[in-house]
Amino acid sequence: MNILTVFLQAPAGGSSPMMLVMMGVMFVGFYFLMIRPQQAKQKKEKLFQENLKVGTRVVLTSGLHGRIAQVQDDGFVIETLSGKLKFEKAAVSREFTETRFGEKAVKATDKPVEKKEIETTENK
């Protein structure tokens, strides 16, 4: 028996209260199992991207590995083995970065590294 058969067998006089309760339960279940976890994941990702600093090693959603050379309002300048490239903030993946670098990425954001990077950019 498929779902279409169930709906076709519903009383013609309107929706039964039991049907409305089932629809409500399905919506609440859908919210807690699908929508809410996705919102929490997006919030963590955005917070991660906003807190990145110069010198942090990152992995982009495309798989590119690099180190943040500059933080700008609209993105990052990432230093790779090929040179420096500019990317949007949304291109940095929290999941890939934590999987690849773990605690190493966090240690790279110490103040001495940041000062060194700032001094080199000011001299140019």
Image: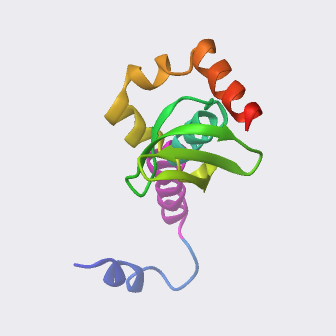
Count all numbered tags in the image, as a single digit.
0
Q: The N terminus is located in which quarter?
A: bottom left
Is residue 85 covered in magenta? Answer: no
Residue 122 in percent (x, y) is at: 76, 32
Along the viewing direction, whichever of 119 and 70 lies nearer the viewer: 119
| Most common SS among magenta residues | helix
Query: Is 66 placed left or right of 85 in the picture?
Result: left
Given residues 101 and 2, the one toward you in this image is 101
Identity of the residue furthest to the left in this view: 1
* Vertical placement of residue 2 versus 26, above or below: below
Q: Quadrant of the C terminus?
A: top right
Residue at image coords 62%, 30%: 54
Q: Is residue 68 above or below residue 75?
A: above
Q: How is the image coloured?
A: rainbow
Q: In this view, does 48 lie above or below 22?
A: above
For the residue pair 7 and 30, the one nearer the viewer reads as 30
Q: Residue at x 52, y 30 (%)?
A: 56
Residue at 54% across / 53% down in the picture? 91
Left/right of residue 64 with respect to residue 83 in the rendered view: left
Q: Whole-percent x and y of residue 25?
A: 49, 52
Q: What stretch is highlighted in magenta?
A: 16-37
- Indicate the position of residue 90 as horizontal and vertical percent values: 59, 52
Q: Position of residue 99 (x, y in %)?
A: 33, 35
Q: Which picture quadrant has residue 111?
A: top right
